[in-house]
Amino acid sequence: MSKSFRSSIAIASLVALAGLCSISAAQDVFPFSDGDEPGSGPGGDNGWEDVAIISPMYTISEILPIGSGLESFCTGISNNGWIVGGAKINSTSSSPTRAFRTREGMSVSDLGTLPGLAFSSAYGVNNAGDVVGVAAAAANLYGSTAKPFIVRNGTWTNLDTMNLGIHAAANAINNSGWVVGLNSFLGTGSVESFKWQSGAPINLPDLPGDTCRISYGQGINDFGTAVGYSAAPGRCGDNRAVRYEGNSVIEMGTLGGPNAQANAINNLNQIVGYSETQVGQNRATMWHNGTITNLGTLAGASFALSINNDSYVVGYYIDTRNQQRACAWINGNMVDLNTLLVNGTGWRLLIATSINDSGQIVGQARNPQGRLRGFVLTPPCRSDYNRDGGIDGSDVSGFIMNWETAQPDTDINYDGGIDGLDIQNFLELWEDSRC
């Protein structure tokens, strides 16, 4: 699956890993935590701006913590609805975080962790329900005890077979069981990308001239093409977005600045992440067929974390009050996901981490009671406009009638306007019986 994992979804930080971006630009470590003080983290009352609903399209479901835990977060969702992430397991401020796997309507259960380690978090899942992530002795899931894992059919496997430490994590898995992540292959200060399906992990190549030996495998598609970032040749403080083709590593360029990071790739080989511009701004970015596209922002810095096979992208941006807000790019239009909720009164969506081909989106938010929770957004089937379970002529007539009176749910492309493009997009979906 395309997956944004990634140090930017990894517990370590969206901010500090390898010096990619400044704290003022990316603001916070993900996942967010209040400890035992509700509302102390981002998305609290201080500075948060509630916004009007532009087009009520997504219904939101809450992913509860484990047991008496107070916090949860979601990091990935497969095309058939498996959801993974991490959750606190008790109500103390020092509660361990544990990896979980669930589906909508199912309870969240503790997957456990590797022997001898107390903490874990899941970062990726495929349609078979195989889960990958990181386990560690430390609460931040970072450092010399951090180990990449896969859980398959209930069995945990440590992918750090060399036990070399420094830092390691498994960030994504595709539907053929290929895993991508990072490990310390030299047993020194280096951290390098790897792929794994069976046997020993395969050390992916560094960019030519990279003397720092720092790279992170972040995402992988179903054809085995992986993406991530690598230290710029001769410049240990700068990173470049890369694509791994077979035994080759390809630098993909930036928006003019010295840094870029690729987080996810879909089966169309569209790659998303973020890059610095020439004037030092971080912007969500897409790389495809040699073209680099600035996806833009609604305010300050923006970051793309996941892309599905319909080219829908999710991530977050920093608003004018320095708050982090979940967002999406749909049909090329950027939207604040807080403006698209059907039943979202009181919710504050902070980060969207993954999107599947059904358009379901997961991430972390603050619920109406002020607690940090994982969430799932589920869109309606847009071509079944009258919601009767079938796609037929009555959907077309109903859509056109409401389009003529500019009803909000006829903004099919989510661009904030109701015009001829909405009719075009609706008919394209309807003709293919797609949602």
Image (spheres, grey):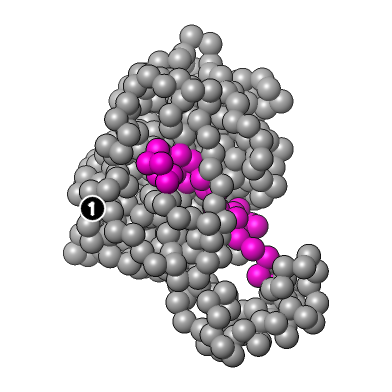
Q: Position of residue 290 (x, y in %)?
A: 46, 67
Q: Which region of the structure is painted magenta?
A: 356-383
Decide if residue 67 is in sight here: yes
Decide if residue 136 is in sight here: no
The answer to whether residue 201 is above or below residue 253 is above
Q: Position of residue 121 (x, y in %)?
A: 48, 29
The answer to whether residue 171 is above or below residue 207 is above
Q: Position of residue 274 (x, y in %)?
A: 36, 56
Point out the image quarter for the C terminus.
bottom right
- Residue at 69% x, 73% y is 385
Q: Nearer the viewer, residue 370 or 178?
A: 370
- Residue at 43% x, 29% y is 70
- Residue at 50% x, 30% y is 65
Residue 188 highlighted magenta (yes or no): no
Q: Report the number of numbered marks.
A: 1
- Residue at 53% x, 11% y is 115
**Image quadrant where residue 179 sits:** top right
What residue is shown with label 1?
Answer: 47
Circle 1: element type:
loop
Query: Identity of the amino acid at label 1?
Result: Gly
The answer to whether residue 204 is above or below residue 248 is above
Q: Position of residue 222 (x, y in %)?
A: 65, 49
Q: Is residue 363 left or right of residue 233?
A: right
**Image quadrant where residue 403 sits:** bottom right
Q: Is residue 103 left or right of residue 210?
A: right
Q: Is residue 392 left or right of residue 220?
A: right
Number of residues whose C-alpha sits closer than 10 Å to that of mark 1, classed few (under 14), some (14–19) or many (20 or more): few
